[in-house]
Image (cartoon, rainbow, N blue to C red):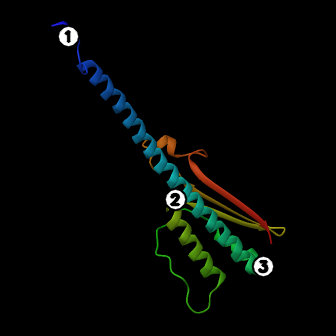
Amino acid sequence: MAGRGRQAGFTLIEVMVAVLVMAVGLLGFALLQTMSVRYSQSANQRTHATNLAYDMLDQMRSNRLGAVEYRNATFTGGTDTACTRATGTVTVASNITRWQCQVRAALGVGSSATVTYAGGIATVTIVWGDQRWESNAARRTGAYETGTLTLSTRL
């Protein structure tokens, strides 16, 4: 009967502590996954904005004599419309309409763009909302909460 005083196995407190530690770890992992999805979405939007800005600059570069006409591509907000390519004779105005539609489709209806051309320098600035997941409306506005991209080039 000398071995009767020795205990084998786990106590209930040890099991509860192990479950608690595991639960905290899993909650941390879930938060990490959520933040990863948010940052991936933000990076995806920044990539779309970069590609769209380069698209506009390339259009201006390919039509240097008419580059000043692309200042009409500036817009603020708008409606969600189907983006179609012009058939037949393609004009600067049809290219601008298609580009504006692509910006809205990729970055949201509330996005805006400013296109300037002065002194041989073309500048495209695109602004979009980057805090759609934020539940507090006051924190969805302002310079910090919006995505902003500006590209310039000499034509």
Mark 2 or mark 1: whose residue is earlier in sequence: 1
Residue 154 image offset from top left, x and y in percent: 81, 68
Residue 3 picture quarter: top left
- Seen at 63% across and 80% down, the residue is 93
Residue 74 picture quarter: bottom right
Closer to the camera: disc 2 or disc 1?
1
Quadrant for the C terminus in the image:
bottom right
In this view, the residue farthest toward the left is: 1
Cα distance in 3D space between marks 3 and 2: 30 Å
Closer to the camera: disc 3 or disc 1?
1
Mark 3 or mark 1: whose residue is earlier in sequence: 1
- Label 2, secondary structure: give it: loop
- Seen at 62% across and 91% down, the residue is 89
Residue 1 image offset from top left, x and y in percent: 15, 7
Q: Please state if 44 lies on the left or on the right of 66 as rendered.
A: left
- Label 1, secondary structure: give it: helix
User: Residue 4: in sight, yes or no?
Assistant: yes
Residue 19 picture quarter: top left
Q: Which label sits on residue 64?
A: 3
In this view, the residue farthest toward the right is: 119
In this orientation, which residue lies closer to the viewer: 99 or 77?
99
Cα distance in 3D space between marks 2 and 1: 76 Å
Mark 3 or mark 2: whose residue is earlier in sequence: 3
Q: Tell me if residue 56 comes above or below residue 145 in the rendering.
A: below
Q: What residue sits right under mark 1 in the picture?
A: 3
Q: Amino acid at mark 1?
A: Gly
In this orientation, which residue lies closer to the viewer: 112 or 153?
153
Q: Which label sits on residue 110?
A: 2
- Label 3, secondary structure: give it: helix
Q: Amino acid at mark 3?
A: Arg
Residue 94 image offset from top left, x and y in percent: 60, 81
- Seen at 79% across and 81% down, the residue is 65
